[in-house]
Amino acid sequence: MRIGIAGFMHESNTFNPLRTDRAAFAAQSLTFGPALLDEWRDAHHEIGAFLESAQALGFEPLPLQMAWAMPSGPVTDAIFDEVVGRLIDAVRREQPDGLLLALHGAMVTESHLDADGEVLARLRDAVGRDLPIVVTFDLHGNLSERLIAGSTAAVAYRTNPHVDQRECGRRAASLLVRHLKGEVRLCQALAKPPLLVNIMVQDTSKEPLRSFMEEARTREGRPGVLAVSLLPGFAYADVPQMGPSIVVVTDGDAALARREADELAAHLWDARERLNAALPDAATAVARALKEERTPVVLVDTGDNVGGGSAADGTVLLAELLRQGATDAVVCLFAPREVEECVRAGVGQEVTLSVGGKVDRLHGDPVPVRGRVRLLHDGTYVESQVRHGGKRINHMGPTALVEIEGRNLLVLTSLRHPPFSLGQLTCLDIHPGRQRILVVKAAIAYKAAYAPIAGTILEVDTPGLTAVNPHRFAYRHVRRSLYPLTDTSPTR
């Protein structure tokens, strides 16, 4: 068996005006052919699992491509057309017996609200229906009927933070190989209950979502059922398919797949009132943090969740920390111009900067600071542990560490970078456990790295492109019946 290995992944925040272009992919991962082996073989990611499974399951892996960019605004048509076109050319050239394809499930382009579905549609138009394609999805995918119809089978991550990506890839590879050997005949069904699952209740280790993920596993153990995936969805994409998805794969029994998917969807709908969240504002949260004895206190800047496609230079918490006289805090900000200023000044020199609030003013205004450049770094580090996102080699771009008043530290990066790894700090000789306060621009994903060293975690309702209150957003394309948006007027 010869099986193609490919991926094209982006989580697109449609409220972000910045476009994700070729440079954004090239800055993270844009690899074609055997070049993806060095970067992804050892990664805690489904691509790594596809490659790992080749020996265990007895197939020849054909490395085709991997494209991944930091969550941001919609993908440009130019890079989308290039990546999909090269994928089609590679499949035609290699003529694999099957294809393992890693997609996110929440990609949007300038012209396509259902970009992942468009990938499958173009593939099918080019190579026909006979090629078995098994797809993996991020747990935050917003899946469409077209997307599921274009794939032979689909499985998604089961954990948030995403620490089971290799396991997900192994499940996908096993399904495809069993199908190719004639041991099973894959078919699937998709159910989409009309609700929005707030991102702050999407920690799969906690209620209410934990019970639903356990139910999905229980259903997967039933006769004839091969896989059950529950995806809470991604609320920051204004698309018709936004919301949770349940995908059930069975051995040739379409009625069983439909029944299992619909039953689990009904249970999720019945619990809709438990799938909301309410958090304290910045002033309240910082005041609590300053009184907290269990340190470090992790302040979660939910409105500037970098992994959800936000600006990464929000200043609401930084400004509040300085206003209330906080000490020994660490704040990371996307600040390429300010990094250049620090480089010009040099290590050990004093700098006067205006940080943050440059991408937009939804996340706070620029904050003036004075401090000393403590360290300059190329911004590349390696994560050896299993972490959300599965990346091993990480790039922040040229990075400056600046110490300002109160022994507070600013990590200024040239690329938007999420707090998925403590390596973001430790590569700069910051010891997270010794700090009083750590600000993470995240929702759930940071926990795999930060929860083990946190004394206290305080989630904060901050404004921005990933605000926890869905009524802050002016949705135009989502289903009008979507709970809790029904009969409400969006406000910024």
Image (cartoon, rainbow, N blue to C red):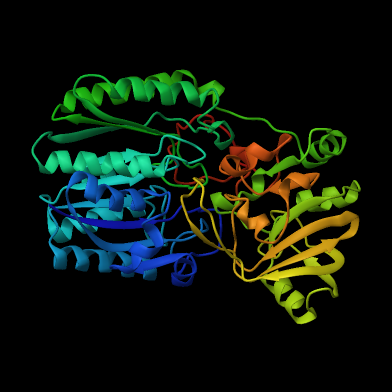
Q: Position of residue 262 (x, y in %)?
A: 31, 23
Q: In this image, 477 relative to 404: left or right? A: left
Q: In this image, 482 relative to 2: left or right? A: right
Identify the residue at image location x=69%, y=67%.
Answer: 335
Does 291 appear above or below 401? above
Name the residue at the left extreme.
182
* Picture quadrant where residue 370 is located: bottom right
Q: Position of residue 205 (x, y in %)?
A: 52, 28
- Residue 492 visible in image: no
In front here: 110 or 371?
A: 371
- Residue 15 visible in image: yes
Q: In this image, 71 relative to 79: left or right? A: right
Count how many numbered circles sit on residues in the image.
Answer: 0
Identify the residue at image location x=21%, y=39%.
Answer: 175
Identify the residue at image location x=17%, y=28%.
Answer: 254
Q: Position of residue 198 (x, y in %)?
A: 55, 34
* Picture quadrant where residue 456 is located: top right
Q: Position of residue 338 (x, y in %)?
A: 73, 72
Identify the residue at image location x=15%, y=65%.
Answer: 94
Does 437 appear above or below 123? above
Does 182 appear above or below 339? above
